[in-house]
Amino acid sequence: MRYEDFLDTGWEHNTTDQKIVERWREAGRIGTPNLRDLNHIRWRLMFESDRFPTIEHATQDWFPPGSPPPVEPGPALPVLRTTTGSRFLVDVSGAEVDYREATAMGLYRLWLDGHRGKIADLLGYFRENDINAIRVLFNLDSDFWLTHGRANSHLQRGFYDELTPFVNFVASHGIYTRLCLFGGVEPFGAIPDWTRRSDVVSSDPAIQGSMEEYAERFVEATRDCTSILYEVANEPAQIGFGSDSEVVRSLGMLIKELAPDRLMNFGCATDEDNLFYALHPADFLDEHLARHDAWDYQASIKRLIHHAGADQTVMPFMSGEWMNLGTHGTESTATAFASAAMLRLKYIIPAFHARCLLWGDVPDSITSECLRAWSRGLDMIPYKSLVGAECNGHWVCSPFDSHIFPPTEEASDEWNGPIRCFGRSSGPRDSDYIGLSIREPKGYEMVTTRECETLHIEQWGSWQCRILRTT
């Protein structure tokens, strides 16, 4: 039998397999090896015994070679704060910080497995592309993360001891870390109902007690680091906490009590009209915005013109994981560009999300082009230059008449003009205006009621988006 065929063949379990599973767990991994991993070790023991005479030899790949050297923290990053009147994060002097975050959900699994080189490659990539913060998830123990080799749990060896070295390693690259404590509820004895996405934690005091003990130990291990922000749970309504969870709120209050000088948000929910988590003592609100796939997800961008989370004034708002940009998402650089520009115009703290970043992989060329376009959108509308009131479409403050908009929002060959132009104006009709034109036909010539300068046009296929301002 060929090796490749052997990997997918089912075999009855025996005592040797039990010892393989024990080695799997000794290596700090959760659950049991999947079939292919198990068969890989079986193959070594059966057909390559000259090289792998024992289970220890056959499973040595699961154990990082030696103990890695201690991590030097490097220069401390300024502690981030929020301040009254600012929609952005600020440093200790009160200066607004251009915080640009990227997903890196499964990165801690790589750290626990000793893959520092791979992590350093990703962090270097982020810095080259002006990303200065990452969001990492902990307690990922569901089938999804197990299947993709990025599961982790506070129950495994070295979990707490490696938290501060990990954060310091990230900080040594000039990058903040948003620590999401609960990426799943399975390590605490809860079993999510994936068919109904129901609350499986609030009725069980033992589970809640276990969560509180974990949160205390986690925060005590990390709160002295200056480069961190805390998040309670990732999509709490989706992973077993239920909607409007008092358990999430209680855990957030505990975290804030233990680390009052570090920023904390309760959780990035997935109900874009629900402001339950815009509550003190949280410092900011995160929302995984709805993904409207019409017009290559530019319907999502238009949706932000009026949005409960972005329009609230209680606290700063972060964009969260609202669309996959690049491979296995939208490959449109125009969409990436426009999404970033709209975040700026709506005073939203930007976060970049791509499917490859779930596992901590350096983005491929297609995803990288989207990230570069996304960064251009942010750079064209610097956060410090944002002044004035919102100006939507053909309002009196806008330099456009209604005839530039198509008579229908159905894409067709007769399409004339953008779906929408949204911007900011500092006063009356002839005052300064800067705005985003969403999804124009390629080559469209903008018709305006007063002089306008196009700062940049980002084209993709038959469509384009542009940033413009009055002159």
Image (cartoon, grey):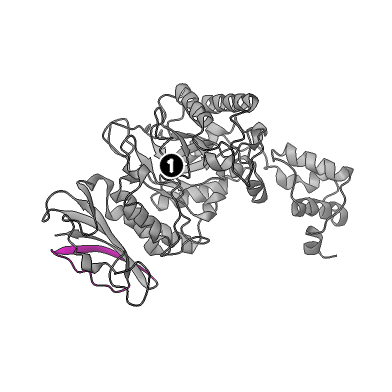
Across and down, in percent, residue 284 comes to 38, 36
Q: Nearer the viewer, residue 49 or 176?
A: 176
User: Residue at (53%, 24%) from the top-left corner?
Assistant: 220
Q: Residue under label 1, please give it.
A: 175
Q: Nearer the viewer, residue 299 or 366?
A: 299
Q: Is residue 386 visible?
A: yes
Q: Is residue 468 depicted above or below 37 in this figure?
A: below
Residue 450 lies in the magenta stretch: yes
Across and down, in percent, residue 72 comes to 50, 34
User: Residue at (58%, 30%) from the top-left corner?
Assistant: 202
Picture quadrant where residue 82 is located: top left
The reply, left or right, for residue 27 in relation to residue 81 is: right
Across and down, in percent, residue 30 comes to 70, 40
Check disc 1 and give the amino acid type: Ile
Quadrant of the rendering where the C terminus is positioned: bottom left
Q: Nearer the viewer, residue 88 or 41?
A: 88
For the record, the magenta segment spans 442-460
Residue 122 lies in the magenta stretch: no
Q: Residue furthest top?
A: 257
The reply, left or right, for residue 346 in relation to residue 217 is: left
